[in-house]
Image: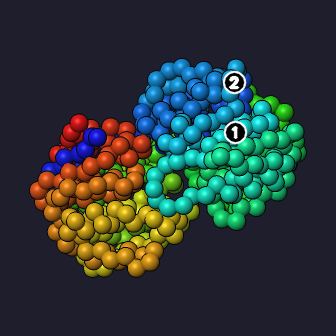
Amino acid sequence: MDKFVIEGGVPLCGELEIKPAKNAILPCLAASLLTSEEIIFNNSASLNDICSMLSLLDHLGVKIGGNVGGALTLKADNIKSLVAPYDLVRKMRASILVLGPLLARFKKAKVSFPGGCAIGPRPIDQHLKGLESLGAKIDVEEGYIIATTDGLRGGEVVFDKVTVGGTENLLMASILANGKTTIFNAAREPEVVDLGNLLIKMGAKIEGLGTDKIVIEGVKEVKGAIHSPIPDRIEAGTIMAATAITKGKVKLKNCFKENLESPIIKLEEMGFSLNFDGNSITVGSGKEIRSTDITTAPFPGFPTDLQAQFVALLTQAEGTSTVKEEIFESRFMHINELQRMGADIKIEGNIAVVRGKNELKGAEVMASDLRASASLVIAGLVAQGKTVVNRIYHLDRGYERFEERLETLGARIRRVK
């Protein structure tokens, strides 16, 4: 397995263009199943998760052209299978997003329960409940979801809790349902809005994107479209935290301020200077890093996908900070590894108490999931001596050539095969 070797102590400086968002691209790729016409993506990112989704779509019979990391063309005019098998689905939770489109267009789907990072239970009961509200019959057999319908019908979907994937699945399913569908307690994340914008280009009738109530008027069919996925706000937030912890200065190009308001507010509370120029954000260091308190929440709250990175940053703040994780129950696995590097952190239930301004020392550490990997890299950038981050295949799922991009900013980091 590959690992990173990092020599800390160098401020990050320079410019970096943010890549398209993994969590926006994945549902948009699944949306190609809704039409026999071409869907063209002007840009993409070279990530393991995107390759996994393309492998699944290829298995189903979608014709794929172009290059991962560049422009992609998908055409689902000759679907060969309605089964998403375990071997392809187990690698990535987003695979469940083929369920809604397959059911809507072909009236049947058999999808294995998905895999992904080990950050706690992420049940798909809300997806299935929502599809049943539209007239689907759901059975579970031998680890597979078997969904059938004689035609989806519009209805009211009330999520018990906010679910990004559930909202995306129901959006895709309902655009071909007969009649009006209303989704209550819908996710407001920018990636959901981006998917909705693609569906509208394809001919869907959707109102309320970006709010907790989305109304869809079903249509008989949708067409092809050309789309440019939004920039990755999580990659942007990760680079912001890395810049801040090293007391550097980096200009992030191609990132949307409105999608980063919560982490921006926290960085400003911590004493960092941020300058905004169109779709560019420059992060600069302050005189000292101040403590702050963070609680993760659905958008527009603080993203759970940035929690681990900001925990690493808070180890260098003056005073004591608290980080409350409200989304996933097992998302503090990076803390044991940060403690190996000298971090003073205690876990009290779903709260991490971070006593800051303690010197981190390089150590050999193990990544447990995608964002934990980024947290350990960020800590390694400021730690004295050499840090070795093992199992970085997690990180490759969500960051394109992460070490190369950090190197362009001056980081001393290399990948060891």
Residue 50 position within the rendered picture, expressed as x and y whole percent measured from the top left: 49, 36
Instruction: Judge by depth and name the residue closer to the eye, 413 or 127.
Output: 127
Residue 362 occupies quadrant: bottom left
**Amino acid under disc 2:** Ile
Identify residue for label 2: 79
Q: Is residue 266 left or right of residue 129?
A: left
Q: Is residue 277 above or below residue 57?
A: below
**Amino acid under disc 1:** Lys
Residue at 25%, 68% in the rendered image? 339
Residue 41 position within the rendered picture, expressed as x and y whole percent measured from the top left: 55, 29
Q: Is residue 383 above or below residue 391?
A: below
Residue 191 position within the rendered picture, expressed as x and y whole percent measured from the top left: 57, 48
Residue at 64%, 23% in the rendered image? 61
Element at badge 1?
Answer: strand
- Viewport quadrant of the N terminus: top left
Q: Residue furthest front?
A: 142
Q: Report whether residue 391 is seen.
A: yes
How packed is label 2: few (under 14 Cα within 10 Å), some, or many (20 or more)?
Answer: some
Q: Is residue 141 above or below residue 296?
A: above
Q: Report whether residue 175 is seen.
A: no
Q: Is residue 220 left or right of residue 304?
A: right
Residue at 43%, 37% in the rendered image? 48
Identify residue for label 1: 110
Residue at 43%, 30% in the rendered image? 69
Instruction: Judge by depth and name the residue closer to the eye, 26 or 227.
Output: 26
Q: Is residue 292 left or right of residue 385?
A: right
Colour mapping: rainbow
Look at discs 1 and 2 and give the one toward the viewer.
Answer: 1
- Viewport quadrant of the C terminus: top left
Instruction: Give the spatial CA distance, label 1 vs label 2.
Output: 14 Å
Element at badge 2?
Answer: loop
